[in-house]
Image: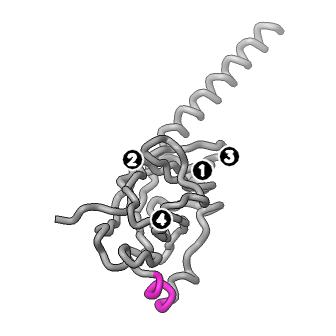
Amino acid sequence: MKKWFIILGAALLLIVSTFNYVLSKGEFVIGSSSYLAMDAPIVKERLPFYLGYGLHWGGFGKPTLNNVTLIKHDGTELNEDDLQISVTSMIDEMGVTGVMNEESVIKEGYINEYLPVENYKVDDNFLLVFRVKLHDANYENNISNLMIEYKNFGFRQQKTLEFEGFFKELD
C-alpha cells in the first residue's frame, strides 16, 4: 500500500511540474510601438496624450491581465505620485490608438471605449494604451521596462518586457 502512495505522489508531482512548465512558456511580445519627440508641441505644452502599443500573447490559454506597471531605469515602479510624469494604462479593443492628443480621443469617442487593464481577458493580440501627462519640462526618458502581471489557468504570473519609454529623438 505504501508503494502505491509513493507512485501516486510521484505521478502527481510529475503532472504538476509539467503543467507549470507548459504555462511558463507563454510570453507577451511588443509588436508595435508609438513615440513622440520631446520637442513636439503637445509635449512642450504638457498636454495629455495617448500612445498605443500592440502586444501579442504567444502561449497556451488566454491569460487575464491583473496589472501593467512601468519600471524606471533605477528599478523602481512608476507610481501615481511621480512628480515628473503621470501614466494610466488601458486597453483599446477597437485597435485605433497610435499617437493622439486627448482632445481627439474625447472628440472621436474613443475614451468611452477604452477598457481597464484589470481583469482584461487577452485574445492573442491586443492594444495597450497609455495616457501620458508630462509634469516636468526637464523629464528624462527614464522608463526601461514594462511589467505585465496576469493569471493563466488560475496561476499568477508576471513577465517583464524591455520598454523604450514614450519619447524618442526623431531624426
Task: Name the residue carrying label 4.
Answer: 128
Question: Which residue, as the protein is rendered here, is positioned at the far right?
Answer: 1
- Please name the amino acid that badge 4 sits on: Leu
User: Does the CB distance between marks 3 and 2 fall below 8 Å?
Assistant: no
Give the Cα distance between marks 3 and 2: 26 Å
Does dot 3 land on a helix, a strand or a loop? loop
Q: Secondary structure at mark 4?
A: strand
Which residue of the protein is positioned furthest toward the bottom in this rendering? Answer: 107
Q: Specify the segment rendered in magenta.
A: 102-108
Residue 13 placement (x, y as % from top left): 66, 23
- Where residue 58 appears, x then y in whole percent? 44, 50
Q: Residue at x 48, y 70 (%)?
A: 133
Residue type for callout 2: Glu
Image vertical order of residue 53 relative to residue 150, above or below = below
Q: Circle 1 is placed at which residue position?
A: 150
Sequence-wise, which precedes: disc 1 or disc 4?
Answer: 4
Q: Which residue is mark 3?
A: 154
Question: Is residue 29 visible in the rendered structure shown here?
Answer: no
